[in-house]
Amino acid sequence: MQVFNSFKSYDTKVLPPTPEAIEQAARLLIDGEVVAIPTETVYGLACNAKNPLAVAKIFRAKGRPQDNPLIVHISDMKMLGELVTSVSPTAKALAEHFWPGPLTMIFEKTPLVPYEVSGGLETVAIRMPNHKVAISIIRASGLPLAAPSANLSGKPSPTTAQHVFDDLNGKIPAIIDGGQCEYGVESTVVAVGGDTVRLLRPGAITVDDLKQVVSSVEVDDGVLAPLDENEQVPSPGMKYQHYSPNARVVIVDADIDAFLEYTTQYLQEHLDERIFGLVFDMDLDKVQNKLPCLSYGDTSLNQANQLFERLRELDKLGAQTVFARSPNQDGIGLAVYNRLLRAAGFEVVTVEK
Ligand code: TXA
Ligand code: MG
């Protein structure tokens, strides 16, 4: 009798990105294994996108729902041609402008892309990462690499090799350590239609960046609001409560004084609860001695960089309730807010100022 859920346990190696390690990663990928690799956004858990058995290993290691499709990573435009039926003039212009970089586009797939990658859809998400190590590994393997973020499904995305190790130790053979990721939030995901794009997931390529190339950008409702139960989902990832730490996260929309008033009153009424604030660096002076706190930067770029790491730290601290200050939503701030909203299960409290 065949045992389908036998789970091989690995001695997970964390390797610096030397030419030897890149060769080793390429060999593992060619052999149908999975390898965690750094990108400029977050770490990805990569495998040969053309091999359904390898793809199944990704879903198993992460505990990811089968209908949530993966992004395929390419190193040049020739690879794109094999994976998609056609590239519209707008998609071509976006690729020329933003690739390599943190932009993912949805295309109609060719039969070369297995349904295991596309989650049963006729479309496939593609991106060309702007990271030397990621590109070297794609080139050395000669393969398009399917790679979701390299976290356990539902956990914050990993922005360091240590985060990957914390989640996937024993479940994958190797992690290539490229240091801290440059952006810290996942790529911008868009669907292209005519000369407009629909933003499905905000990222480091902002709405204003996209508008430099296309005439109009529609932000999908799912970016800032929970989906109705029976609603057609444009991107399956929107359905899942991503990025959720163990703690209950609540976004508090208020200036720092109102934030403190609200949270310290809650604290007094819930003395047996482990409560933390997640505030901006500039708040720390005012917050001191009033509320145990972590801070996640002041600028949107810093917040993008730090948010997932702070959510992981809050879990380690055993936080039960986290009150987070509401970030600025401009530029890459929209991505920060989108991830925090999902971590909070869309729980937002507005305190009158
Ligand atoms: O920056 C990133 O995008 C990272 C790095 C590793 O490249 N990857 C990443 O992958 O964030 P993942 O799997 O965590 O997120 C992929 C998102 C999901 O929300 C998924 O639903 C959406 O892209 N997606 C993938 N294929 C799609 C498709 N065919 N149509 C619509 N959405 C799709
Ligand atoms: Mg993910």
Image (cartoon, helix red, strand yellow):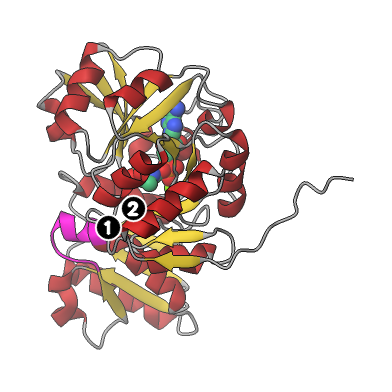
Image quarter in which the C terminus is found: bottom left
Residue 341 drawn in magenta = no
Q: Quadrant of the N terminus?
A: top right
The residue most toward the left is 212
Q: Main secondary structure of the magenta part?
A: helix
The quarter holding residue 19 reads bottom left
Q: Position of residue 327 (x, y in %)?
A: 22, 56
Q: Are marks 2 and 1 in contact (CB under 8 Å)?
A: yes
The residue range painted magenta reads: 296-305
- Check disc 1 and report the residue beneath it: 181
Counting from the top left corner in percent of width and height, residue 332 is at 19, 46
The picture quadrant where one finds residue 261 is bottom left
Q: Nearer the viewer, residue 353 or 10?
A: 10
In this rendering, position of residue 236 left or right of residue 187: right
Determine if the C-beta at disc 2 is less than 8 A from ligand 1.
Answer: yes
Disc 2 to disc 1, C-alpha distance: 6 Å
Label 1: which secondary element:
loop
Q: Count the numbered circles shown.
A: 2
Mark linked to residue 42: 2
Badge 1, how many Cα within 10 Å: few under 14, some, many 20+?
Answer: some
SS type, badge 2: loop
Residue drawn at the location 30% of the way across and 46% of the way down: 136
In the image, what residue type sits under mark 2? Val
Q: Position of residue 320 (x, y in %)?
A: 47, 73
Q: Residue furthest bottom?
A: 289
